[in-house]
């Protein structure tokens, strides 16, 4: 295959940055999506310094016009997209502030709306804008970066381990993201485009105040492997390092 073109949203830091690094070191041209021009340019520069072909793409997933502009630029520059990693996300929980993760009965609805806006609606906006470009790829791959916290099976288990906190805004957004994976995979069945969810595991990033026990690179390795699935790989699956996750 010719050089893969890979867009990673929220790639200026954390798991997204490491995913860009792995895919770039593997030979892909990586498009570093970031909502901050300063942070995005810096991240792309770091990768270029490592010999990766990295370009910054301004991309706030909640800015519909900006998303269309990004797709138009990618189309004009490359004519197609091979890999889309929907990585950008927020949590409404501050790891240092227990009051920021109240039980569902005390969650402010605006926190749920905010989580869904970025983590779900943003993914729909980016995916729909990029799909015409992904359809031009001989082996399009969409990876939705989900979480074990999106698993209804895990969250409805008789006892919830401390590693799976009952965070309504974030958890519900990742369950909804999994629903997107199933829906897009169904629409795209029979095409070369595969759509999968990945749970990268609990990685130390800004998202959780660096409390994760895995490195962002470990989480990114799972995402990159699913982004590079062979043609006989799964679609519409919810994958971890250890295989399929229960929905
Ligand atoms: N860390 C974990 O343990 C863990 C576990 C399971 C799943 N995940 C998932 O892994 C993905 C990456 O998370 P992370 O841990 O690497 O978190 P992170 O370090 O906080 O990175 C999140 C990235 O998303 C970007 N972002 C947020 N809102 C955005 C928007 N509206 N438009 C564009 N970019 C936006 C952030 O940009 P700014 O720098 O501008 O804020 C940042 O680049 C997320 O989908 C997360 O839910 C993480």
Image (cartoon, rainbow, N blue to C red):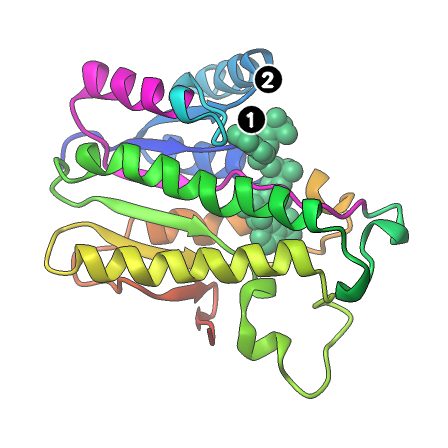
Residue identifier under label 2? 39
Badge 1, how many Cα within 10 Å: few under 14, some, many 20+? Answer: many
Secondary element type, mark 1: loop
Q: Is residue 119 visible?
A: yes
Q: Residue visible at 54% across and 12% down?
A: 37
Q: Is mark 1 within 8 Å of ligand 1?
A: yes
Residue identifier under label 1? 12
Q: Residue visible at 28% across and 15% down?
A: 73
Q: Residue visible at 54% across and 20% down?
A: 43
Discs 1, 2 touching: Cβ within 8 Å: yes
Point out the quarter of the image occupied by ligand 1. Answer: top right
Q: Is mark 2 within 8 Å of ligand 1?
A: yes
Q: Is residue 205 visible?
A: no
85 with respect to 136 (left or right): right
Which span is picked out in magenta? 66-94
Q: Which quadrant: the N terminus?
A: top left
Q: Is residue 28 magenta?
A: no
Q: Nearer the viewer, residue 114 or 144?
A: 114
């Amino acid at each position: 295959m010719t050089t893969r073109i890979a867009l990673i949203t929220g790639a200026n830091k954390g798991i997204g940055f490491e995913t860009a690094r792995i895919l770039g070191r593997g030979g892909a041209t990586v498009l570093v999506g970031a909502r901050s021009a300063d942070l995005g340019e810096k991240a792309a520069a770091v990768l270029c310094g490592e010999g990766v072909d990295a370009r910054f793409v301004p991309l706030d997933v909640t800015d519909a016009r900006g998303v269309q502009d990004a797709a138009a630029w990618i189309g004009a520059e490359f004519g197609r997209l091979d890999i889309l990693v929907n990585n950008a996300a927020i949590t409404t929980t501050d790891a240092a502030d227990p009051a920021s993760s109240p039980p569902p009965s005390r969650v402010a609805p605006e926190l749920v709306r905010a989580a869904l806006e970025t983590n779900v609606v943003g993914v729909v906006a980016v995916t729909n804008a990029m799909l015409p470009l992904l359809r031009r790829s001989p082996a399009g791959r969409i990876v939705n970066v989900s979480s074990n916290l999106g698993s209804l099976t895990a969250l409805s288990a008789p006892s919830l381990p401390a590693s799976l906190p009952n965070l309504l805004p974030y958890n519900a957004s990742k369950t909804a993201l999994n629903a997107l994976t199933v829906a897009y995979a169904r629409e795209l069945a029979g095409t070369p485009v595969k759509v999968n969810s990945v749970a990268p595991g609990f990685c130390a990033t800004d998202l959780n105040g660096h409390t994760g026990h895995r490195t962002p690179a470990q989480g990114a390795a799972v995402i990159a492997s699913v982004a590079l699935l062979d043609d006989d790989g799964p679609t519409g699956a919810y994958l971890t390092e250890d295989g399929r996750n229960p929905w």
